[in-house]
Image (tube, rainbow, N blue to C red):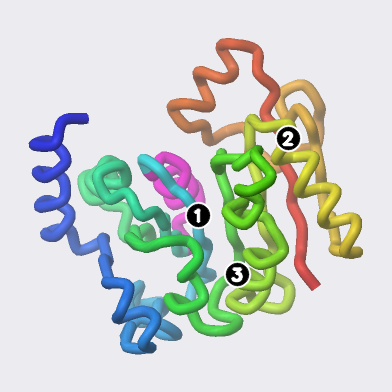
Amino acid sequence: MGSKNKLKRFKENETFENVIQPDRATLVEGNFDLKGKWSEKFKNDNPIILELGCGKGEYSVGLATKYPDKNFIGIDIKGARFWRGAKTALLEGNNNVMFLRTQIELIDYAFAENEVDEIWITFPDPQIKYKRTKHRLTNDEFLQKYKKILKPDGVINLKTDSEFMHGYTLGLLHGQGQEVIYANHNVYKNEGAPEEVTQIQTFYEKQYLENNKPITYIKFRVK
């Protein structure tokens, strides 16, 4: 994507009512006024579901369309990417989906304790090299952040094409004695996956499937 196109999208994001872009200082200094008040922003008390590393926002918009009685927030630092999802949501009149531009590691500054009902992590960078472990979105540090903002019965979903990420996460969860509700190393070949796992697909997921690459999925709770 050219720099001019990126700038155009950044500018357009600023006009979208479904895009929130706090700066880092506002978050870490505790001045983010939506923390603990996301229900007021959505103007209802429906469950709040996050998609971390939402990319183009396809999954957030897909879930919002499928579940109009729930609220969805796609989170990514790359605003030029989720511009597509934000614009699609506005054009289609999906008032139950928003986009938050921030780093995932600041998630506990953006949401209050027990404010979130569910988290989706869709096709994250597996960060395979050992020195990149701290950046994996399912490492212990991130899991503890998720636990903090999730309600006691809240669940986390990991959908990935990376067998490494799937195995790493499953091993970590079992090692910690966490509750693994469902795990599948190939959701399109094995039965039992929740319908939103197979009915909603991202652009890149479709490419993976065309190349016969298995899509894995884990649903779990962090105690």
Going by the numbered disc 3, the residue's amino acid type is Asp
Q: Position of residue 12 (x, y in %)?
A: 12, 51
Please tell me how crowded label 3 is: few (under 14), some (14-19), or many (20+) other residues with Cα within 10 Å: many
**Mark 2 highlights which residue?**
164
Spatial separation of the CA atoms under disc 1 and disc 3: 14 Å
Q: Earlier in the sequence, mark 2 or mark 1?
A: 1
**Mark 3 highlights which residue?**
117
Quadrant of residue 74 in the image? Answer: bottom left
Q: Earlier in the sequence, mark 1 or mark 3?
A: 1
- Dominant SS of magenta comes to helix
Element carrying mark 2: helix
Q: Split into 4 quadrants, where in the image is the N terminus?
A: top left
Going by the numbered disc 1, the residue's amino acid type is Leu
Q: Split into 4 quadrants, where in the image is the C terminus?
A: bottom right
> Which sits in the foreground, 194 or 3?
3
Please tell me how crowded label 1 is: few (under 14), some (14-19), or many (20+) other residues with Cα within 10 Å: many
Spatial separation of the CA atoms under disc 2 and disc 1: 19 Å
Task: Give, as a single range, the part of the protein colored magenta.
Answer: 57-70
Q: Position of residue 86 (x, y in %)?
A: 27, 49
Q: Residue at x 64, y 48 (%)?
A: 131
**Mark 1 highlights which residue?**
52
